Image (cartoon, rainbow, N blue to C red):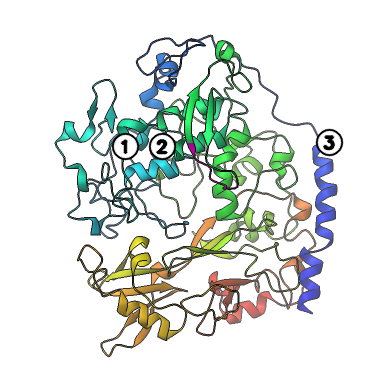
Amino acid sequence: MKKKILKRSRGGSSALWALIGFISLLLSPTVIAPQTSTHVRFVVRGPDGTPLTLESKIPYSPKKTCGACHDYERITRGYHFQQGRTDGTGTIMVKDAYHPKHPWNLSSGLYGKHSPVSIDSSQLSKKVNRSFSEMDKSSFYFVQTCGICHPGGGWAEFDRKGNFYYDEALKKWGYEQSGDEPGIDGDYTSFSAGDEEYGASWDQSGVSEADCLLCHLKGYRWNERGAAIRGRFFRYGPSVGAGWAILKLSEEGSPDRVAKEIEIDYSKNEIADFENLHLQITKRPPDENCWFCHALYGEKKRGYDWRLQTDVHKAKGMDCVSCHPGNKGHDLAKGNSLPLTVRDDLDNTMNSCEDCHYKKKDRKAPRYRHPFSPKHMRRIACQTCHLPYRSLTTELVYDHTTGITQVYDTLKFPPLGGLRAEIWYPPLRDYQGKIIPVKPAIPIYWGDLDEETHTVKPIPLWKIRELKKPLPKDDDGDGIPEVNTFDEIKSFLTALRRKDRFGNPIAKTPVLIKGGFLYFLSKKGEVEKTPHDQAKSIDFSLNHNVRPGFLAVGARGCKDCHTKNSPFFLRKELIDPFDEKGKPIYVEAWERIGINKEKLGRLLLEQ
């Protein structure tokens, strides 16, 4: 019975209805008119401010070019550029004592905030350290890896004391101006991810200036810019992105190719025309420019894309900045995403669903008409019904236990009920009194327990990789070994009490964070577990891929939710990918939204 209901309410015919609906939407008039460039003519300049010519062979400087008219300093205080380094006033926030309770977090954003649901669980090294044992990734490492999407400026230009990493005009390092010791300084150390020779050659790479064309040039060459950044050609990034360069790349076949050599050529005009660049500047950033970075985050972390077929707003002609307009300081309007904390002062600065469709802040937005009780609107967020499912596979589990991160996606743990494996239904949460849809991410990692505060400091993965550890078995038969039995956990926890290669203890009180529990060794040396907040899933808000009313939950009446085998209240959510026998553990939606069994029984009555 359950499979039949699930198929009827979500499955086979929904794709046909979606196609019909979106064809009709596409035939409707759009709300965004095409724009033309009105930018004045300007001079392209080099790093010293000198005008460049078609024959010039040095990379251009966005700071000197665009900054000749625009307030570069104010613009780069925007959160896209700083990502936790400063607040909106430009005050440096990233610091070693930023978060007393979680001392491994050095800021509120990407630059300084540790995320256990990332491919390598990167931790920014503190500014001041006593030895390599305390360190993970340097600022140079962050620019070289995260700088692929980062627009430049902020921590890609300045160290944590506000100095240029390397001032090319003065030929001086930032640590020379502040009198710091570079060897164990998180901004200048040659040590990163366990590699003592990783290097931080700011004098050769140059700093990464804020690249205005990254957002304001249609057809920008993202992949080539990424190759330049990976190759440590930071100062060349803007010129490469504009198409004004010839690159010698690493061997084909790798998804992350690296530039080996770069030659500037301003005569190339397939993307940007050096002499008529002012005619190509777009005031309103094209969606594809936003999407190049946000696709990585949106698709992998939340399972959303931005296409006519998957979002009713996109189908009606709206673009990214329709909902996320920017101000003169280049701070784009924000919502309030659950796990993200950068610039919380700007939360909810964009219009909500209610603002446009109920409070009439957007006169063109259709008014909602719902036949059911108003209490549904008070208790259930709009997204919960208008984001009924996801059709894009997304990352679900980040297992760091072996030191080499293994990511499992939603295809590994398909929905129960016989639907297509790539289709999954957002788990539900009670947030500020409303039921909302989320995409959970499940981290599994080793840590060091502070028994006084009961917080767990994640252990850098380079230490796990170097650990002399037992080989776990493959208990679930997928060809990938996993740490899941008490014997395996005990062996790892015992090994983590040893010293690293620099002679310092890896962990005083080693623990495992997994599936809602903290695993530890008792005084008798046996594995025990206890619930722990850090072991809960990290939930990502869902707001995109909004379906029109006829595809929303409830469009077919009360039985979409209020039925004996309800796909709404009884949908499954993974909480642990493998128990001791290698089997996944699930809970049902009602268990996570504050409903007891008695109330559940009433809600499941046939209507």
Whether the magenta-drawn stretch holds residue 254 is answered as yes
Residue contact at pointers 1 and 2, CB within 8 angstroms: yes
Determine which of the numbered discs, if any, sits on residue 27 in the image.
3
Query: Residue, x 41% and y 37% (percent of image)?
Result: 232
Mark 3 or mark 2, which has the lower sequence index? 3
- CA gap between label 1 and label 2 equals 8 Å
Q: Which amino acid does label 2 sit on?
A: Arg
Residue contact at pointers 3 and 1, CB within 8 angstroms: no
Q: Which of marks 3 and 2 is in front?
A: 2
Q: In this view, does 3 lie to the left or right of 131?
A: right
**Rendered image quadrant of residue 313:** top right
Q: Nearer the viewer, residue 173 or 416?
A: 173
Q: In this view, does 101 lie to the left or right of 272?
A: left
Q: Would residue 435 be seen by someone viewing this image from the given angle? A: no
Query: Residue, x 80% and y 62% (percent of image)?
Result: 556
Q: Would residue 99 be seen by someone viewing this image from the given angle? A: yes
Question: Residue reaching furthest bottom?
Answer: 524
Whether the magenta-drawn stretch holds residue 423 is answered as no
Q: Nearer the viewer, residue 153 or 575?
A: 153
- The C terminus lies in which quarter of the figure? bottom right
Q: Which amino acid does label 3 sit on?
A: Leu
Question: Residue reaching furthest left?
Answer: 179
Q: In this view, does 23 lie to the left or right of 198?
A: right
- The N terminus lies in which quarter of the figure? bottom right
User: Dot 1: few (<14), some (14–19), or many (≥20) neighbours within 10 Å?
Assistant: some
How many numbered badges does the structure rendering display? 3
- CA gap between label 3 and label 2 equals 47 Å
The residue pinned by badge 2 equals: 232
Q: Main secondary structure of the magenta part?
A: loop
Q: Which amino acid does label 1 sit on?
A: Ser
The residue pinned by badge 1 equals: 201
**Which range is magenta?**
253-259
